[in-house]
Image (cartoon, rainbow, N blue to C red):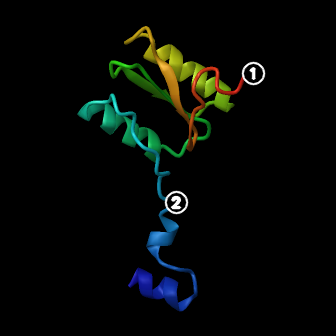
Amino acid sequence: MIDSFLRDHHLGTRDIAAGPTPPSLPAPPQLREKGRAGFADYLATSSPHRAFAVSPKGAYAYRSGRRSAREAAEAALAACTEYGPDCAVYAIDDELAEPAGAGSR
């Protein structure tokens, strides 16, 4: 009934009103099942400025709702290092982060 009303008034359907689909980024390969679920939660978060950090051994953390991408990355990295000393930022907002040193010459 609702979809019919929306269609009749050229408003689309509830699927369109539900919002955008999460971005499609590959999960870090070192994550286990719980970490992959955490990464899926990160992708589904629509808060502005979010970041995901991970260690080579699978420790991870993400933070969202920050004022800037840099602030989100710093917060995720700080949270991740509580679980693993060698964490790196993996994703920022909807993009993979640059590897350390990739942007400098």
The 10 Å Cα crowd at callout 2, few under 14, some 14 to 19, many 20 or more, is: few
**Residue type highlighted by circle 2:** Pro
Q: Quadrant of the N terminus?
A: bottom left
Which residue in the protein does label 2 denote? 20
**Residue type highlighted by circle 1:** Arg
Q: Residue at x 50, y 83 (%)?
A: 6
46 over 53 or under it: above or below: below
Report the side of 52 relative to 103 (left or right): left
Q: Quadrant of the C terminus?
A: top right
* Residue 96 x %, y %: 54, 38
Q: Considering the numbered disc 1 on the image, is that residue within a helix, a strand or a loop?
A: loop
Report the side of 30 relative to 75 (left or right): left
Instruction: Name, please, the residue furthest toward the front.
Output: 105
The 10 Å Cα crowd at callout 1, few under 14, some 14 to 19, many 20 or more, is: few
Name the residue nearer the viewer: 89 or 100.
100
56 over 94 or under it: above or below: above
Q: Considering the numbered disc 2 on the image, is that residue within a helix, a strand or a loop?
A: loop
Which residue in the protein does label 1 denote? 105
